[in-house]
Image (cartoon, helix red, strand yellow):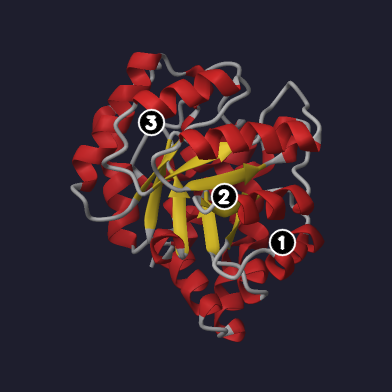
């Protein structure tokens, strides 16, 4: 899918200081990413703090992004969880007309076997009216979707078109790139190794830092896709300290501090997450201040 090549960004959900959803700030976030040149937007990913949003708030965020985007960029919707039957029901009942694909995380907490992961995504693929991007993030799910399982799913279901690979394991990503079907996309879920994955044959990234630095990060990935490694790594090294900082005390606390420094949103997150501490906030603020040209 050409529309999923390049940089997608996993949008935050901005909150006001009273912890209510800040719709005006969300509009600014969306426009900032679009104006910065990213290729697509991901709604209701982990970075959106969807675990602490009510059903009504999720719909508010989804509809706001659709309205602000106005069809300018492809949209991907996060539809995943650890209750397979519930996900299948949502896939059968939700209107996906505004979305290019879904991003579906491997089941968390349950810790299924590889066969369990396969059967879960088999049910998702058979129910989904749009293409499916698998999402492997063992640091959050407590189980790793092995390359053999990914490749099995890619071969068995035409609508399983990509994986967001966030195991932080370059060797694992390379194995998927090597053995998956020709048109299957390997999308980095780790900002720090997105460029190496692209240079090795990956299709791009679903990024966190990319919404704070959309122009720079998306251009870096495009350079990588064009095998212009020397030029691309200049941006990689420029942003590497900030990438480390935004994950130092958890996501999305770090990227929300970037947005506060840019004057786009508050840095408010919902419990059990907390905002970055004063020391990290100062370091992020200094980076943003010194990076603005």
**Residue 40 horizontal/vertical position (percent):** 38, 55
User: Which label sits on residue 157?
Assistant: 2
Q: Nearer the viewer, mark 1 or mark 3?
A: 1
Using the image, determine if residue 29 lies above or below residue 51. Answer: below
Q: Quadrant of residue 39?
A: bottom left
Instruction: State yes or no: discs 2 and 3 in contact (Cβ < 8 Å).
Output: no
Answer with left or right where residue 70 lies relative to residue 216: left
- Other residues around mark 1 within 10 Å, as few (<14) / some (14–19) / many (≥20): many
| Disc 3 element | loop
Which residue in the structure is indicated by mark 3? 14
Mark positioned earlier in the residue sequence (1 or 3): 3
**Residue 26 horizontal/vertical position (percent):** 31, 36
Q: Nearer the viewer, mark 2 or mark 3?
A: 2
**Residue 252 horizontal/vertical position (percent):** 54, 36
**Residue 35 horizontal/vertical position (percent):** 28, 59
The quarter of the picture where the C terminus appears is bottom left
Q: Residue at x 43, y 37 (%)?
A: 12
Answer with left or right where residue 23 lies relative to residue 285: left
Q: Quadrant of residue 246?
A: top right
Q: Residue at x 62, y 51 (%)?
A: 156
Mark positioned earlier in the residue sequence (2 or 3): 3
Is residue 49 among the parts visible in the rendering? yes
Instruction: State yes or no: discs 2 and 1 in contact (Cβ < 8 Å).
Output: no
| Disc 1 element | helix
> Along the line of sight, which residue is nearer the eye, 202 or 60?
202
> Along the line of sight, which residue is nearer the eye, 63 or 126?
126
Which residue in the structure is indicated by mark 1? 176
Mark positioned earlier in the residue sequence (2 or 1): 2
């Amino acid at each position: 899918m050409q529309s999923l090549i390049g940089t997608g960004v996993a949008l935050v959900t901005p909150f006001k200081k009273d912890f209510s959803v800040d719709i005006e700030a969300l509009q600014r976030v969306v426009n900032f990413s679009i104006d910065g040149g990213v290729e697509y937007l991901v709604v209701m990913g982990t970075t959106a703090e969807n675990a602490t949003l009510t059903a009504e708030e999720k719909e508010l965020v989804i509809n706001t992004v659709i309205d602000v985007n106005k069809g300018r960029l492809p949209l991907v919707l996060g539809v995943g969880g650890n209750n397979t039957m519930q996900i299948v029901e949502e896939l059968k009942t939700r209107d996906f007309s505004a979305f290019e694909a879904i991003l579906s995380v491997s089941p968390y907490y349950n810790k299924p076997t590889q066969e369990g992961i396969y059967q879960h995504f088999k049910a998702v693929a058979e129910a989904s009216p749009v293409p499916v991007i698998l999402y492997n993030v063992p640091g959050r799910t407590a189980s790793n979707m092995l390359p053999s399982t990914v490749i099995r799913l890619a071969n068995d279901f035409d609508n399983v078109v990509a994986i967001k690979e966030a195991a932080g394991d370059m060797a694992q990503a390379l194995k998927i790139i090597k053995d998956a079907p020709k048109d299957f996309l390997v999308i980095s879920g780790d900002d720090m190794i997105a460029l190496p994955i692209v240079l090795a044959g990956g299709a791009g990234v679903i990024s966190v830092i990319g919404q704070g630095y959309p122009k720079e990060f998306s251009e870096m990935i495009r350079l990588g896709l064009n095998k212009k490694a020397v030029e691309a790594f200049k941006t990689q090294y420029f942003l590497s300290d900030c990438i480390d900082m935004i994950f130092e005390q958890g996501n999305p606390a770090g990227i929300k501090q970037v947005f506060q420094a840019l004057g786009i949103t508050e840095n408010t997150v919902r419990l059990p997450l907390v905002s970055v501490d004063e020391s990290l906030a100062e370091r992020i603020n200094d980076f943003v201040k010194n990076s603005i040209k």
